[in-house]
Amino acid sequence: MKFRTWYLPLAIALVFTPIHVLPESESMIPSAVSMKLPDHIADWELERIPASKEEIETLAPDTEFSKAICYRTRTAEFDALTGRFFRDRLDLSIVLSGHDLNNSIHRPERCMPSQGHTINQTTDIIIPVTRDRNIKVRRLLSVQTIPLNQERTEFRNFDCVTYYFFVGNKHITHDHYARTLLDMKDRLLHGLDQRWAYVSVSMWYGDVPWVQKKIHLEEADLKIRELISELGKDQIDWQMLEQ
């Protein structure tokens, strides 16, 4: 029993330790995801936003970012105070890795707690893109605590659902460790750096300030899946993946 207790951690350490000593390659093969976001995805309007200071300072200098807030009008809900219809909001982020494997993209479970998230549930879901193509994603349910003032004396909790996946040159995976093993294989056997794009879409649900009616989790799930499906049709070069 003692052997079994320490064998698994040791095996994992032996597998992933080489990541930190692998040399950087001069050749980088691109991700199959386009980093240029459109103005619209289906009936969602995209408002591009810059990466945060924390993201820029935390990740390697050659990391690339494409981020947007996605809005869609709730045609049945009119705000008499502003004279406008209420709108749904999704947050879209694509982060493209650079040369530095040790300081590039990582699974969001690692950084979300620093953004106020307490993750309560993790599941895997397959999202159809076309009749014969689909994307397997990881789905996280969390509660995000947001400060309401600069003094950080008042806070509000929001229920949040997040979907994410990784797109490389020839592979899509929702598993960070599978992505890491593919990186190691590329470097050790082929001398290549595979650029990976980390794609995430999130939405607050429940009682949120910018809609009139409560957003149920099932509604938030449906909206995110629709957006990812549409995004997969145009932002991903499937011919690269199918080589």
Image: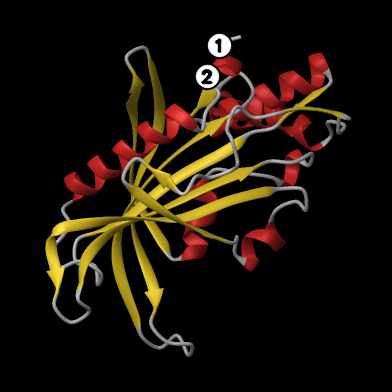
Observer-nearest of 152 and 34: 34
In the image, is 161 to the left or to the right of 103? left
Q: Amino acid at mark 2?
A: Trp
Give me the C-alpha separation between circle 1 and circle 2: 6 Å
Residue 52 in the image, given as x and y percentages of width and height: 60, 65
Residue at 25% of width from left, 61% of height from top? 87
**Compared to 26, does 91 lie above or below?**
below
In the image, is 136 to the left or to the right of 5? left
Residue labelled with disc 2: 238
Residue 121 in the image, given as x and y percentages of width and height: 32, 45
Residue at 55% of width from left, 11% of height from top? 242
Residue 57 has which mark? none
In the image, is 23 to the left or to the right of 119? right
Residue 213 in sight: no
Residue at 46% of width from left, 49% of height from top? 39
Residue at 48% of width from left, 87% of height from top? 150
Residue 97 in the image, given as x and y percentages of width and height: 68, 41
Observer-nearest of 224 and 7: 224
Labels 1 and 2 touching (C-beta < 8 A): yes
Circle 1: is it few (<14), some (14-19), or many (20+) Cα within 10 Å?
few
Q: How many marks?
A: 2
Q: Secondary structure at mark 1?
A: loop
**Compared to 80, does 22 lie above or below?**
above
Dividing the picture into quadrants, the one containing residue 152 is bottom left
Residue 122 in sight: yes
Residue labelled with disc 1: 242
In the image, is 218 to the left or to the right of 115? left
Q: Amino acid at mark 1?
A: Glu
